[in-house]
Every structure is written in structure tokens, then in C-alpha cells.
Image (cartoon, rainbow, N blue to C red):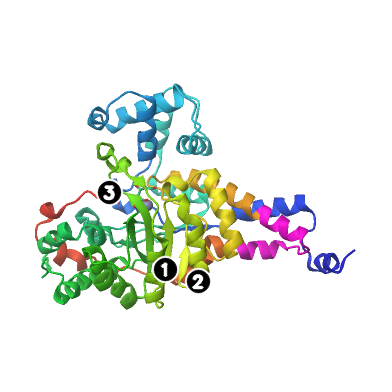
Amino acid sequence: MTKTTENAAERGALLDPTQLRREVTDVVKTTPVIDVHTHLLAPQFGEMSLFGIDELLTYHYLIVETFRSNEIKPEHFWRMTTIEQADLVWKTLFVENTPLSEATRGVITVLNALGLDAETTDLSEARAFFRSRNLSAHVDLVLNLARVSDVVMTNDPFNAQEARVWETRADIDKRFHAALRMDRLVNDWEHTVSMLLQLGCQVDTRRSAKTATEVRRFLGKWIAATRPVCMAVSLPAEFKFPASDARHWVLREIALPTAREHGLALALMVGVRRGVNSALGVAGDGVGRADVGALERMCSEYPDVRFLATFLSRENQHELCVAARKFSNLMPFGCWWFLNNPSIVSEITRERLELLGTSFIPQHSDARILEQLIYKWQHSRDVIAESLCEAYERLLRSGRAVTRQEIERDVTRMLRGNFLEWVGDLPSGPLMEPSALSADHVRNPEETDVVTTY
Ligand code: FIX
Ligand code: ZN
């Protein structure tokens, strides 16, 4: 017996690789996770809170896959009702083809988790099941099955429909936390100015100090009303920092000062190419390799702001890890969108473990439909567990065994602690007085109504 194994036995460490594997898998599967980026909305948001088989099947990931296996034209597809679209997706991807892709397998995982027939040719049983569910009991069931304790939503301050909910509902489910989405301001300043004017803000198109102050005031009201856990923005592959464009001005004069003033972390999601095929609507976005140097310069210039960052291109993942080694105000998170496939999640998670230890957030779900939490987390946990098993086994071979408590500490840090360190305690108290946003959205609610795509 070596000195290490003697000590390990005393500490109750796991020396047997099979047992180590069992414990790691169990801890990863059972530790509740904070889902740091989703597009879910709490049930109090009514029809904006999506769930059920028809929504699952008309997820934009599945719509594009349908166009690859069915000759239907997008313009025809968009004219169909949601139920007709769901039937077509099911027939095309699940009946006429084998659901091997990650997004199709996800639906199979969900159906099985809910005790529904995943081999059926028609959706009537599934539809009846979802119709019969009491929404609040259903949310509890899904969060329990997915072992998700908290969900971070995506909240667009220019969405009047959402604003009305924040104004009128004091009872928003406390497990759902707001994130202040900055896309319209940062990526579409010219159009957003006119929305701000309609909302009664004293702004103009010139990038003046007065305009910046007024927009920060507008955001301050949203922050008071929704108590976001962080701010978030997606950025295109060609994003530069510094730059001389409107995006740079909004970031420097509005977003970053707001993050500073309110002590909010800023999540940057970099590398999307919006509208590569605009006929596909929300499904038409693509990916491009971005410049991680832009993020490094931001982290360096704003050492007092905490950044969360995820890149869409596989080619940027190693550079992101290296950047995080240089800047302790940078937290890599998630395997975003086209990266959320087992082979790539595995590669990225292993790379991050090797370069960053446990100082990263391995995954977020990006769920848009409630039940996706079940599959996205089940699939991700399988891969995260496998990557961790490998890392602990390698460590064991080098002469250091770990205990169950150490595994729990590590996994809790990755699935919860790192995010909490960045954003502080998650708010759970009552929101501000419900009427507080009215001044901004009451002038002409119909005119300012936008359908959010975030
Ligand atoms: O910008 C984003 O937050 C993206 O995640 C989405 O807009 C995208 O459409 C998506 O759902 C990816 O999973
Ligand atoms: Zn997203």
C-alpha cells in the first residue's frame, strides 16, 4: 500500500474506479441545477409560457430538420396552424425517419419521461395528456424530473405583452428569475430609438450623453420592476471591441454603466449570424467564428464588471478557456445552441476541465418549451458525468483519490456555485409595486407591442 492509498482509505476516498464512476454519476444526476439561460417564462406569463407536445414539435431546431427531409416550402409551412405543423414534423422526423438527431432524440426522452408512447404514429394521446395537466403541478413535475431548482428567463424590456404581466402580477413563480435582455438596444439602436420615443423617453438618434442617461433611467425602472439576476446580450460573429459603431456606444455608455451601477453581471453570447436564411424566421440564424480578443479587451477595461460568456463557434472554445485563465472576471458558460450535442458538449467540457478545473458553468439549456428542460438536462448531465469520471479516474491514476463529499463540492460549484458567485443571492422577495412600469408602456400599448424573438 502506498502512502497515498493509505491516506485515501483513511479519508474514505474512492479507490475503486467502478465505485468512483457510480458515485460521480449519481452526484451529477441528483444535484439541483440553476439553469442560467433559457427562453422560458413563468406560468404567470400566460400564452407566452410555452409547454406541450405541439410546442415541443414546432421548436425551431426541429422545423429546420423537417425542411431537410420534407419538400414543403417554408412559406407554406408558416401558413399552417401549430397543430398542422406539429403533425407534419412528427410524420417527417419521427415516423418516416428515425429520430437520431439531438433535437429529435430530445422529444423521445421527454415522451418517455412523462410515460407517453414515443413510437406512436399519431399525437392524440400526447395531446390529451398535456390538455389534462394542471399547469402549476406540471411545472413542479417538470422541474423535479429535470432537477432544475431555478430558471433564468430572457426578458425583453421592449415587449409590451411582458411589461403588462410584470405590472399586474405580483405572484410570478419565484423559481423563475429575470434576465434583462439588451439585444434591441445593442444590436438595433436605430430602430430602438423610435420605440423609446414611443415609450415616452426623451431620446434622439444622436449618441448624446443626455440620451444615454435617459436610456439608463428606462433600464433602471425595468431593473427595479423585474429584479433581474443578470443582463444578457447576443453578439454577431463580427463583433469588435472597441469599435466606432452604435453597438459600441450602447455597450460603453448604456449597458456597461448599467451593469456597474446595479451590480449586475453581463452575459455575452457571441458568434451568431442572424438571418442567414431569413425565410426560416427564428430558425434561420447561423454561426460564425468570432474574435475572443474583443471579450478580453472588455474584461481588461472593466475589471469591476463580472462577465459570463459563451461562444457559438466550436473554433472559439479553446480561446475562451485561455481568456478565462487570464481574467478572473470572466466566467465561461454553456455549450450554446449548435454546440449542444453530446459529441461537442463532451469535447468542450473536457477541454474546460483541463484548463479551468471547476471554475466554469458547464451548461445551460436554452429551453424555449418547458418540457425541454427534461431532455436538455438529462442529456447534458450524462455527458458532464462522463467527462468528470474521466478526469477523476485520471487523477486517481496519478495518485489522488476523491471522496463523495469532494465530488459533491465540485459538482455543486459547477451547477450552482459559480453562477451564484457571479450574480449573488437569487431574489426571492416580492417584486416592486405592480403599476411601476405603466408610465413607460401605457401611452399606446398597441403601437409598442412587439413579438419577441428572444
Ligand atoms: O439569442 C439567443 O439567446 C439564442 O439562444 C436564441 O435566440 C436561439 O434562437 C435559440 O433558441 C438557441 O438555442
Ligand atoms: Zn438563447
Q: Nearer the viewer, residue 430 or 206?
A: 206
In the rendered view, tell whether residue 179 sits above or below residue 450: below
Is residue 42 found inside the magenta-colored segment of the image? no
- Give the mark nearest the N terminus, 2 or 3: 2
| Cβ–Cβ under 8 Å for marks 2 and 1 | yes
Quarter holding residue 434: bottom left
Q: Nearer the viewer, residue 191 or 86?
A: 191
Q: Amino acid at mark 1?
A: Glu
Quarter holding residue 4: bottom right
Instruction: Report the side of 44 relative to 216 (left or right).
Output: right
Q: Residue at x 37, y 76 (%)?
A: 301
Instruction: Report the side of 431 relative to 10 (left or right).
Output: left
Give the residue number, with chain letter if any, for mark 3.
453
Q: Nearer the viewer, residue 278 or 265?
A: 278
Instruction: Report the side of 62 relative to 213 (left or right).
Output: right
User: Would you say the beta carbon of the disc 1 residue lies within 8 angstroms of ligand 1?
Assistant: no
Q: Magenta region, mostly helix, strand or loop?
A: helix
Counting from the top left corner in percent of width and height, residue 230 is at: 37, 66
Q: Nearer the viewer, mark 2 or mark 3?
A: 2
Give the residue number, with chain letter if any, for mark 1.
296
Q: Which element is circle 3 on?
A: loop
Mark 2 vs mark 3, CA separation in Å: 34 Å
* Neighbours of disc 1 within 10 Å: few (<14), some (14-19), many (20+): some
Q: Nearer the viewer, mark 3 or mark 1?
A: 1
Q: Which element is circle 1 on?
A: helix
Q: Residue at x 27, y 49 (%)?
A: 453
Q: Nearer the viewer, residue 377 or 383?
A: 383
Q: Amino acid at mark 2?
A: Lys
- Give the mark nearest the N terminus, 3 or 1: 1
In this picture, which residue range is highlighted in magenta? 389-410
Give the residue number, with chain letter if any, for mark 2.
326
Is residue 392 found inside the magenta-colored segment of the image? yes
